[in-house]
Amino acid sequence: AQSVTQLGSHVSVSEGALVLLRCNYSSSVPPYLFWYVQYPNQGLQLLLKYTTGATLVKGINGFEAEFKKSETSFHLTKPSAHMSDAAEYFCALYSGYSTLTFGKGTMLLVSP
Amino acid sequence: DAGVTQSPTHLIKTRGQQVTLRCSPKSGHDTVSWYQQALGQGPQFIFQYYEEEERQRGNFPDRFSGHQFPNYSSELNVNALLLGDSALYLCASSLGRVNTEAFFGQGTRLTVV
């Protein structure tokens, strides 16, 4: 069965600090992986995705993620946090036929 | 392009009632999927419609049903509402059934009292 685990329901960083949000997956087939961001009372916005090819994927708003097959991980990073990055972040695994399996989410808190 | 639009944005219903939520997909998209996002949880797949038929279904009871219209728009119906059905309901659209890219609407916040 396919699954996604996000380590840490809440992550707190200071403005300007490194952001690291962790995601591990389980899949019986080569995975397609996604990170989405959700601002309060909003839908989901795609940050970045990995399908095939380069394992370091760059997304919007300065975020990037690295696919590591040996570690079954797809962690999201950003070198310097901004206040506007405060939101909930979801890692997702493509489950076939345009459907996604999501992790439980990580709330990113950014303090001045 | 208006993207994926959902209506209404918020809804309050009483336990036992029935509710209908609506979704208009992104222009040109023919596949609509529905997700339930309970408070503090990630979205969970409910079902998917393509060519006006339910094609995939997640682990949800038959109280959850849907429909897709010829213009690709879709409805999600929930009967005999329970308090536990309170959630954000998200609609996602894609082009074709086998597409890794899905676009999400803003969601409908359903509160059951």
Image: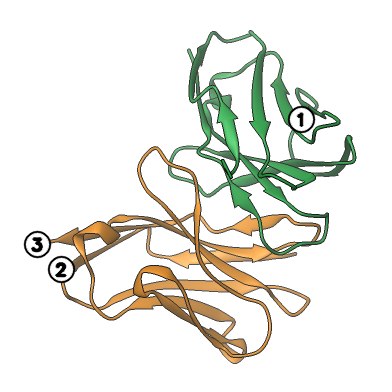
CA neighbours of label 3 inside 10 A, class few (<14), some (14 to 19), many (20+): few
| Extreme-front residue of the structure | B1
Q: Which residue is mark 1?
A: B61
**Tag shown at residue B31:** none
State the residue at coordinates (54%, 8%). Answer: B14
Question: Viewed as shown, does residue B36 lie left or right of B65?
Answer: left
Q: Which residue is mark 3?
A: A112
Q: The residue under label 1 is which amino acid type?
A: Pro
Residue carrying label 2: A15
User: Residue A17's quadrant in the figure?
Assistant: bottom left
In this view, the residue in front, B97 or B110, is B97
Q: Is residue A42 left or right of residue B72?
A: left
Which residue type does callout 3 highlight? Pro
- At 83% from the left edge and 28% from the top edge, which residue is drawn? B69
Circles 2 and 1 on the same subunit: no
Badge nearest the viewer, 3 or 1: 3
SS assignment at label 3? loop
Judging depth in this view, the residue of B22 and B88 nearest the camera is: B22
In the image, is residue B24 above or below residue A48? above
Amino acid of disc 2:
Glu
Q: Do tag 3 and tag 2 residues touch (Cβ < 8 Å)?
A: yes
Q: How many marks?
A: 3
Residue at image position (49%, 25%) is: B9
Q: Position of residue A2 (x, y in %)?
A: 71, 65
Chain identifier, green in the render: B
